[in-house]
Image (cartoon, rainbow, N blue to C red):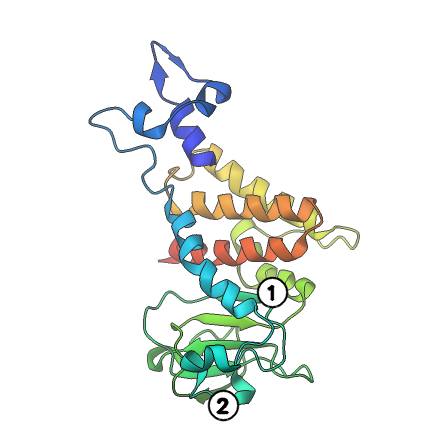
Amino acid sequence: MKGAYYNVTHQEVDGRRRSNEEADGCRLTVVSEEGMDPFWESLLEPVLHLAESLPYDISCSLPHLGTRQHVTLWSDVPVGHRPGAGRQVTGLRTVLDCPASATALRQGPDTGDGPAWLLHLCPTHTEALTSWPGACTDTAGLGLECGRVIEYRTTEQLLQSHADLWLTRLTGPRPEIPERTWADLLEQAHQVLSTRLDGHDTDEDSPLASVEMMVDMARRRAAEGDLQQATVALSYAETLALRLDA
C-alpha cells in the first residue's frame, strides 16, 4: 500500500530514511515508534470497506438474483424491480453517505430489458441526487441502505458515468481527444491525484489518499485491458470521494 511505504520510508533511522527495498522487509507493528500514531492508522479502512462489501457484491453479481435463495431479502419487492430478474448486474455503487434504510427506488432509463440502474433512497433523500434523474416509487422491503445503486449498464457506460459524475470534477477538466482510451484517461486522473499528494496538498491519511489508491488500482486494471475490474475500483473510489465533500 502506497501510504504504508510513505510512512516507513519517511521515518529517519540512524540519520537516514529507509529505501523501498528495506521497507519491503518491515513490519508496521515493529517500525512504529512509541508515542507516535501507528503507521497503519487509517490505511486499512479502504481494505475493510472492500472486505465488508465483497460478500454482497458477489451476491448481486449472481445471474439469478431474486430466485428462491434470495427470497428473504427480496420477498416484498415486485419482480420487475428485483436486480436478478433475468438480468446481469454489472456494478454496485454507493453514491450517498446515509446509513438509513431505503424505502424508495429511483429507476434509470429503460433499456428495453428494464431500467439501466436502480437507486435506493430513504424518505429524507427521495428528492436528492438530481444527477441521477428518473422515476421514483415507494417500495417496501428493499433491505439496502440509502444511496446504493445497482447497475445494469455496460462497462463503457459505467466508465462514462464515473467520469461525468465525479472523476472529472475531482481531477480537473480534460480536452476531448477521440483517440484517447479509458486507460489514458485513468492514467491522467491518477497523475493529478498523485501530484496533489506528493505536493503535500493533503495528509497521507486523508480520504484523498484512499481515493488515489483506488484510482491507481483502476488505472492498472485498465492498462491490463480489464475495464470491468477498473469499474469495480472506481466504484470504491467514488464512495471514498464522498468524504471529500463532507
Q: Residue at x 44, y 77 (%)?
A: 120
Give the residue at mark 1: 161
Does the rendering let one see residue 127? no
> Which quadrant of the figure has residue 168?
bottom right
In the rendered view of the protein, which quadrant contains the C terminus?
bottom left
Q: Nearer the viewer, residue 96 or 19?
A: 19
Residue 241: x, y in percent? 45, 55
Of tags 2 and 1, the one toward the viewer is: 2
Q: Nearer the viewer, residue 182 or 231?
A: 231
Residue 95: x, y in percent? 46, 66
Amino acid type of the residue tagged 2 in the rendering: Pro
Give the residue at mark 2: 78
Amino acid type of the residue tagged 1 in the rendering: Ser
Real-space Cα distance between discs 2 and 1?
Answer: 27 Å
Q: Is residue 192 above or below residue 138?
A: above
Does the rendering let one see residue 54? yes
Give the label on residue 88, or none.
none
